[in-house]
Image: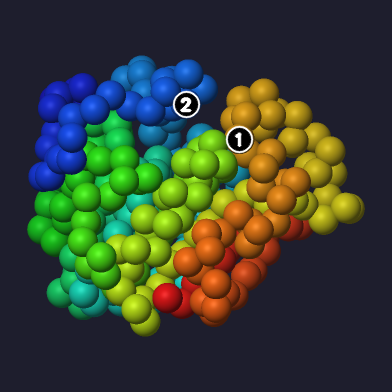
Amino acid sequence: MRRPITTPPAFDAAASPSPPPRYLTRHYWWAYVHPRAVRIFERQWLVNLILWGNFRKLRDAALDALGQTLPGRSLQVACVYGDLSRHLLERARRASGRLDVVDVLPVQLANLARKLPDRQGLTLHHADAAALPMADGAFDRALLFFLLHEQPPEVRRQTLREAWRVVRPGGRLVLLDYARPAWWNPLRYLWLPVLERLEPFAADLWTHDITALLPAEWAGARLERRRYFGGLYQLLTVER
């Protein structure tokens, strides 16, 4: 019998046991906070449908931006529905590396622990992405996969500062998220009203170029950007 996802997991380290941020419980209870939501959305076909059939392509693009093998320490900021974390862990294990995953919701960490019962090379942290409990320069690389559009602007900027802080000089950050589609993409006109209804902070990434939202600490960093699906999605690779 499968262990219920509400069973206390299995996170290995925790910062302060504070409640989830209010923006999560107010706007995303239906997608991430409620245990029933986790049972509904933890279906890869559904994640793929939400991303208009692009989940595998975007997952692999993010993985390849990090590297075919991941020696040292890698950080995934926030859990992700689907098999992204499994592939990350496999790439880390190929190089005897380690993967750390941080999330502010115990139910999400419990779900990931259920998906990855073999914890070799994996550490789960119960903490807020905007206040990471890791030391400066602790990681060789970090990934933020469809996280930023879910955060209010001030939280988004602090999350980016924290990701920058914990990646060592010479390390790499990979960001994959929404962007403003090309003018000819019909989703430019059809998808935004849906996002505004369900994900009220996502429109920021349509009205502001993501580079305008980057903290001052990132000035001078080498950025490479790629766009997918008519510009609806963007991948930023940042060399620390």
| Secondary structure at numbered mark 1 | loop
| Secondary structure at numbered mark 2 | helix
Q: Is residue 215 above or below residue 205?
A: below
- For the residue carrying disc 2, how many other residues have a C-alpha within 10 Å: few (<14), some (14-19), or many (20+)? some
Q: Residue at x 77, y 52 (%)?
A: 181
Position of the C terminus by quadrant: bottom left
Position of the N terminus by quadrant: top left
Nearest the viewer among 22 and 29 is 22
Q: Residue at x 48, y 66 (%)?
A: 217
* Residue that badge 2 annotates: 23
Q: Are marks 1 and 2 in contact (CB under 8 Å)?
A: yes
The circle drawn on residue 58 is none
Specify whether residue 175 is in view: yes
> 45 left or right of 21?
right
The circle drawn on residue 201 is 1
Q: Earlier in the sequence, mark 1 or mark 2?
A: 2
Specify whether residue 64 is in view: no
